[in-house]
């Protein structure tokens, strides 16, 4: 991970370089509707401060996900004086999701018991 970037273009180029994926493969992923040569030329223009094209925010996110390198994110954090984030561990996220699901299931179970209790007392007729 690089400590300093010259600009956003440096960060984008660094992400592509660090990914180990050929530039042409990244370009084809970024612009799948284009011919490989055209996609390559477009990505080259997008990665150059002198180029006449820029990647959108969504495209930068797509590039980071495909390359599995997050230099543009780190550059944005550095440039806005924010701390660089730590990557979430998938296992930790899975544990959190299971807790949320279990909590929701418990809430649903309690609500169903309360509804059954009301029905048993003849308070309502449930129409589905």
Image: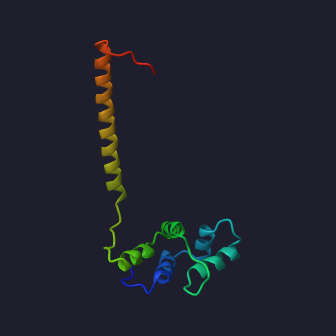
Can you give x and y, in whole percent of width and height, for residue 58 in the image?
A: 52, 66
Q: Which residue lies furthest to the front in this view?
A: 123
110 left or right, relative to 42: left
The residue that appears at 68% across and 65% down in the rendered structure is 33
The residue that appears at 30% across and 45% down in the rendered structure is 99
The residue that appears at 38% across and 15% down in the rendered structure is 125
Q: Residue 96 or 50: which is nearer the viewer?
A: 50
Q: In which quarter of the image is residue 30?
A: bottom right
Q: Is residue 117 above or below residue 94?
A: above
The residue that appears at 30% across and 14% down in the rendered structure is 120
42 left or right, relative to 4: right
- Quadrant placement of the N terminus: bottom left
Can you give x and y, in whole percent of width and height, for residue 32 in the image?
A: 65, 66
Q: Residue furthest top?
A: 122
Can you give x and y, in whole percent of width and height, for residue 7 in the image?
A: 45, 84
Can you give x and y, in whole percent of width and height, for residue 84 in the image?
A: 33, 73
Q: Is residue 111 above or below residue 100?
A: above
Label count reads 0
The figure's colour scheme reads rainbow
Q: Is residue 52 above or below residue 61?
A: below
Q: In this view, does 124 lie above or below 93?
A: above
């Amino acid at each position: 991970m690089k400590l300093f970037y010259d600009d956003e273009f440096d960060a984008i180029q660094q992400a592509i370089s660090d990914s180990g994926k050929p530039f042409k493969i990244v370009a084809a992923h970024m612009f799948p509707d284009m011919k490989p040569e055209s996609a390559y030329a477009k990505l080259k223009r997008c990665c150059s401060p002198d180029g006449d094209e820029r990647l959108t925010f969504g495209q930068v996110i797509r590039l980071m996900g495909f390359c599995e390198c997050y230099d543009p994110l780190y550059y944005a954090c550095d440039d806005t004086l924010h701390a660089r984030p730590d990557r979430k561990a998938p296992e930790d996220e899975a544990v959190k999701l299971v807790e949320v699901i279990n909590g929701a299931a418990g809430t649903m179970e309690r609500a169903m018991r309360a509804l059954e209790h009301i029905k048993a007392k003849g308070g309502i007729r449930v129409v589905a």
